[in-house]
Image (tube, rainbow, N blue to C red):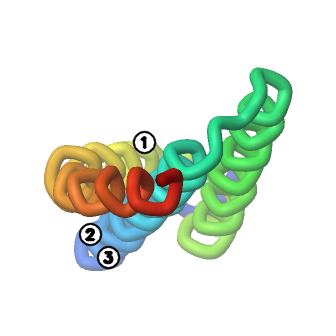
Amino acid sequence: MSEIQVNSAAQATSFWIAAALGAALCLLYDLLRLVRLIRRPSTAAAFVQDVLWWSAAAISTYIVMLVLSRGAVRAYILAGEALGFVACRLTLSRFLMRLFRPLARGINS
């Protein structure tokens, strides 16, 4: 049986690293949204883009869990990643998309 982190400082650090990963994944998704605003992809291309994004998200989550908890699935790491994604989506992402839309319209014109 693997050792469980009992150090709350280590758990808090892992949580915030996972939150940063969630925010980075949100920003990566915003970049994908910008590409879709500039050039409307076909249904198949959108599917491939989504699969690539989900693959990147899964691999990065796996690597973070491997580094932070020796590969063990920890709920606080998943919660940190989800919190980072949602926080970025509700704050920075909204601001960026307000900037991206006129940019995309200008490029499409």
Give the camera-side residue of 25 and 63: 25
Q: Nearer the viewer, residue 62 or 21?
A: 21
- In the figure, is residue 58 to the left or right of 86? right
Q: Residues within 10 Å of mark 2 (few under 14, many from 20)?
A: some
Q: From what the image shows, is residue 72 above or below residue 11?
A: above
Residue that appears at 44% across and 46% down = 78
Left or right placement of residue 96 versus residue 38 in this view:
left
- Can you identify the residue that label 1 sits on? 75
Q: Residues within 10 Å of mark 1 (few under 14, many from 20)?
A: few
Q: Residues within 10 Å of mark 3 (few under 14, many from 20)?
A: few
Q: CA distance from mark 3 to mark 1?
A: 14 Å
Based on the displayed image, in which of its 4 quarters is residue 99 positioned? bottom left
- Do the numbered discs 3 and 1 sit on residues whose CB atoms are within 8 Å? no
In the image, farthest residue toward the front: 109
In the rendered image, residue 50, in percent from the top left (x then y), is placed at: 70, 37
For label 1, the SS is helix
- Dot 1 or dot 2, earlier in sequence: 2
Q: Position of residue 44 (x, y in %)?
A: 84, 26
> What amino acid is labelled 2 in the image?
Ala
In x, y percent, where is residue 26? 42, 54
Asked whether disc 2 touches disc 3, contact meaning CB atoms under 8 Å apart, the reply is yes
- How far apart are the alpha carbons under marks 2 and 3? 4 Å
Residue drawn at (52%, 52%) of the image: 108
Which residue carries the number 3 mark? Answer: 13
Task: Please state which of residues 34 and 38 is positioned toward the viewer in this rendering.
Answer: 38
Q: Which mark is residue 12?
A: 2
Amino acid type, residue under disc 3 in the picture:
Thr
- Give, as a three-letter code, the residue at label 1: Ala
Question: Which secondary structure, mark 2?
Answer: helix
